[in-house]
Image (cartoon, rainbow, N blue to C red):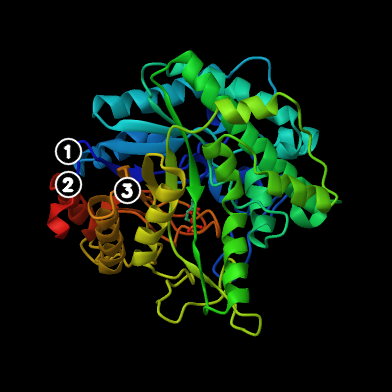
Amino acid sequence: MEKNFLWGGSLAAHQCEGGFLEGGKGISNMDLVTKGSKNTDREIHNELREGYYYPSHKGIDFYNRYKEDIQLFAEMGFTALRISIDWSRIFPNGDDEKANEEGLAFYESVVDTLNEYNIEPILTLFHFELPARLISKYQGWSNRKVVYLFEKFAEVMFKRLDGKVTYWSTFNEINHLDPNSVSSQFFTYYLSGLNYEELDNPKEAVARIAYNTALASTRIVQLGHKINPKNQVGCVFGINPQFPETCKPETMLANLLENEKELYQMDAMCRGAFPVYKLKEFENDGIQLEIEESDKADFRNGTLDFMGLNYYMSSVTPNEESENEALFGGIQNKYLELSEWGWAIDPVGFRYTMNWLYRRYQLPMIITENGFGAEDTLLPGNIIEDDYRISYLESHIKEMMKAIEEDYVDCFGYLSWAPIDLVSASTGEMSKRYGFIFVDLDDNGNGSGKRIKKKSFEWYKKVILTNGESLK
Ligand code: BG6
């Protein structure tokens, strides 16, 4: 492994910050989502209601405790931390004239703290945090106007943090948007604040969000380079590869087409053109996009500097006659174990995905998320024996190292999700824990909020200290 390989973790504002309405923050889409559970979906509200718990309001109070948390990351030897900027902290309504100084000062202080510890800040401009006003006024990303408002927000951030941040990500996981895929229904809200079931023309909305976000990414890449040529602007993709259940040719074809649903936007952002087959597919479905002549030049000139990979699991494309559905479509893989939340544990699938994407796009890659959500037990003496987490991470990091050292994938870092417990994006629970650091809060936000090191804390510290050699 290269000496300057980045080791660290990733966080998202709506899952950790809390600080609801503090420092002039406005309401974002994620502030309107209630707590769910393994078996209950989170509810999406149009406005805040009495008697419900909205987990983003409290998060883990990173907003007020970031110095303490970053100090713990530094103790583990982190050389990188990925955070996201909540757009509604900077432009509370999304389309305000002026940026909110308190919001800017907050992110600048977080970045300064990271730099003091020589931890490379990696900033995601959009990790599902959309000012709620943009939903009621413009229908979120389905309206092209939002592309330009986002650009204004990005420009403010690039300028304010110029010289302090090199690595930027335009979006987190916009690639789950295909008008004909089931998971898009869930992601339509996370990515654009729209309730899929309430839309008049949901397929068109999904296609528009997909096109507009991909276009926005290309414009932000160009903007970032113009403001400072040293800026490295990438995008983070969540890839959950599907394998065919059998080699039956029909299943092979279905499998190919399923995987492509998650990749066409990535093609647009990495290869310099929005795929023509996809535009024809949209047209054939009666979907109208808001396309302008200048878009072609934007796709050509705004290709990514690097790709971020979020990897958790793989799944299977069934033969027509198969039953036994798995999470996020497909069926359960008989060779793999599941986490308590039904996510298939597949370290070799990680190596597979790294090779697949690297060979397809030939761009430098960073692992921006990988981790294991599990319930932890706090034993007397503040002890947490999270061997299951160590085992997941160890097997995945080993496969990543094989991808780098044996397959020559150009990967420059590994960021775990998440280095500290935080609110789960899909369920809103605290009890789906990922961290090396335990946070004493329950699913309703009750508890001291105290930070406690788990067994995995020392384990990851050693991995970083030895640059992965301790796993060999
Ligand atoms: C990724 C998201 O897809 O999965 C994160 O980028 C999320 O925001 C992570 O937290 C894990 O998912 P969950 O639902 O277990 O929090």
Amino acid type at mark 1: Lys
Per the rendering, the mark at residue 467 is 2
Vertical comparison of 450 with 337: above or below: above
Element at badge 3?
Answer: loop
Residue occupied by mark 1: 3
Front disc: 1 or 2: 1
Q: Earlier in the sequence, mark 2 or mark 3?
A: 3
Residue 365 found in image quarter: top left
For residue 11, side relative to residue 450 (left or right)? right
Q: Residues within 10 Å of mark 3 (few under 14, many from 20)?
A: many
Quadrant, the C terminus: bottom left
Front disc: 1 or 3: 3
Residue occupied by mark 3: 409
For residue 434, side relative to residue 210 (left or right)? left
**In contact (CB < 8 Å): disc 1 and disc 2:** yes
**In contact (CB < 8 Å): disc 1 and disc 3:** no
Q: Residues within 10 Å of mark 1 (few under 14, many from 20)?
A: few
Amino acid type at mark 3: Val
Vertical comparison of 390 with 93: above or below: below
Q: x, y percentage for residue 466?
A: 13, 48
Element at badge 2?
Answer: loop
Tell me what residue is drawn at x 68 percent, y 50 percent: 188
Q: x, y percentage for residue 258?
A: 61, 63
